[in-house]
Image (tube, rainbow, N blue to C red):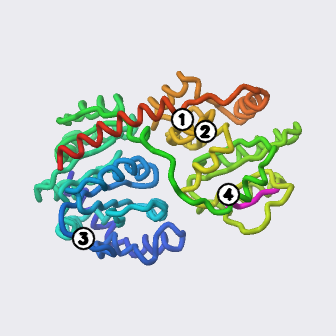
């Protein structure tokens, strides 16, 4: 199986010039930094101990930020390397003022690249986050006696079925990790079925995400605009979900609600399509990056920047979380919950089953099944005049305990 995987990665390598060019044209690749994926590094390795974190994208990166901030204060850690695969995560990294930490793109999973990567960075410990399991890189790390852990590990029911079809291969790959720390009970059960050893449940690091101290452009203009208006937010939306929310907004406005919809799409490269969907229903809209004055007839505020979502949650106490109606899996609801927002979500939230179960139990979140029930829930919320409840203290307490557990486990393995 490993031989077949290696052949597949070499095929990807041969096709990579075409793939990279296409991604550059689609604004999904950095034209100045894509060579990092071929182990042509843009940052230098400092002297001393280096800890390496690998995250796939934005959500995984944000989950380790509190941990990285704590580790930066440790004197026996001289440098921290964070790798990821997406352009969005690289852009977000720049918004944080790390002192010891640098970012690079994760290399293609080829033996020659993995060996070169390890020889250059010489990590004291490698930490893979969430579901990032790369067979050749983890095998090469093991051969080079680098302590490797899988942190905040997550395996969905769907991905477990795929791993289980190749169980002997899966077990061999997971054995490359010295320790595996699942983020929930479901993942722990799946890991045991795959024959994984050295498992310890620490809790979900996404509870630890904290408010980002990032300067947001144009926010004062937005604050003045929404004065005395009601606001709801569609956050981390995927294809098809913006259209649903736009049509719901249109129907709500027909009932004379003085209402603004904030749309924060998961991927802003789909911006043109979202704009066309807004135009099709005839609503006025404003893009957050625009320097123009916000027009009075604006009914939809479109956030077309990365890393600024949390700042808008302060002004919207009702949030629909995307990837839950037209797409399956759901998005992480912790950020709006910590900002005291009531959360609405579709039926497809298998990526965060335990989180949504907890939020539902605490009456922080509610399930909707279609546009009609979404509209109904929003109307019920708008009619209520109850005070905003405080959810953040409970979530912050959970997050602090989880962060300390993860910090202790990481530090004892250095």
Mark positioned earlier in the residue sequence (2 or 4):
4
Other residues around mark 4 within 10 Å, as few (<14) / some (14–19) / many (≥20): some
Question: What kind of element bears circle 2?
Answer: loop
Residue labelled with disc 1: 348
Instruction: Report the span colored magenta.
Output: 284-288
Q: CA distance from mark 2 to mark 3?
A: 44 Å
Residue at (84%, 42%) from the top-left corner?
258
Horizontal relation, residue 81 to residue 28: left or right: left
Other residues around mark 3 within 10 Å, as few (<14) / some (14–19) / many (≥20): some
Residue at (54%, 69%) from the top-left corner?
26
Count of numbered tags:
4
Q: CA distance from mark 4 to mark 1?
A: 32 Å
Other residues around mark 1 within 10 Å, as few (<14) / some (14–19) / many (≥20): many
Quarter of the view holding residue 303: bottom right
Residue labelled with disc 3: 45
In the picture, the disc for residue 219 is 4
Q: Are marks 2 and 4 in contact (CB under 8 Å)?
A: no
Residue 196: % across, % down: 20, 36
Nearest the eye: 283 or 134: 283
240, above or below 388, in the image: below
The answer to whether one can see residue 161 in this image is: no
Q: CA distance from mark 2 to mark 1?
A: 6 Å
Question: What kind of element bears circle 3?
Answer: loop
Name the outermost residue toward the top: 361
Residue 318: % across, % down: 67, 37
């Amino acid at each position: 199986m490993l031989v077949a995987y290696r052949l597949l990665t070499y095929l990807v390598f041969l096709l990579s010039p075409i793939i990279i060019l296409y991604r550059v044209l689609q604004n999904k690749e950095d034209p100045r930094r894509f060579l990092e994926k071929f182990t042509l590094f843009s940052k230098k390795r400092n002297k001393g101990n280096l800890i390496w974190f690998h995250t796939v994208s934005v959500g995984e990166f944000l989950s380790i930020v509190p941990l990285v901030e704590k580790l930066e204060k440790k004197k026996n850690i001289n440098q921290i390397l964070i790798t990821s695969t997406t352009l969005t995560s690289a852009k977000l990294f720049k918004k944080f003022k790390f002192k010891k930490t640098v970012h690079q793109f994760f290399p293609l999973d080829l033996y020659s690249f993995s060996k070169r990567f390890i020889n250059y960075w010489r990590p004291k410990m490698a930490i893979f986050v969430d579901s990032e399991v790369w067979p050749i890189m983890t095998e090469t790390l093991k051969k080079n006696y680098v302590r490797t852990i899988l942190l905040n590990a997550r395996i969905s029911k769907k991905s477990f079925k795929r791993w289980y079809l190749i169980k002997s291969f899966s077990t061999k790959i997971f054995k490359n990790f010295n320790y595996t720390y699942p983020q929930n009970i479901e993942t722990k059960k799946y890991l045991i079925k795959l024959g994984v050893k050295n498992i310890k449940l620490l809790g979900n690091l996404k509870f630890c995400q904290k408010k980002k101290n990032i300067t947001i452009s144009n926010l004062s203009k937005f604050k003045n605009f929404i004065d005395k208006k009601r606001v709801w937010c569609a956050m981390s939306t995927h294809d098809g979900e913006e259209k649903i929310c736009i049509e719901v907004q249109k129907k709500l406005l027909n009932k004379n609600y003085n209402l603004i919809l904030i749309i924060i799409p998961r991927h802003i490269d789909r911006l043109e399509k979202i704009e066309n969907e807004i135009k099709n229903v005839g609503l006025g809209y404003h893009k957050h990056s625009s320097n123009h004055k916000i027009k009075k007839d604006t009914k939809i505020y479109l956030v077309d920047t990365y890393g600024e979502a949390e700042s808008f949650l302060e002004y919207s106490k009702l949030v629909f979380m995307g990837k839950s109606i037209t797409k399956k899996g759901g998005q992480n609801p912790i950020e709006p919950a910590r900002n005291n927002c009531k959360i609405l979500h579709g039926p497809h939230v298998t990526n965060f089953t335990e989180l949504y179960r907890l939020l539902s139990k605490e009456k922080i979140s509610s399930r909707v099944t279609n546009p009609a029930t979404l509209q109904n829930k929003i109307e019920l919320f708008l009619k209520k005049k109850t005070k905003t409840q405080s959810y953040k203290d409970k979530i912050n307490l959970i997050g602090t305990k989880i962060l300390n557990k993860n910090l202790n486990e990481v530090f004892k393995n250095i």
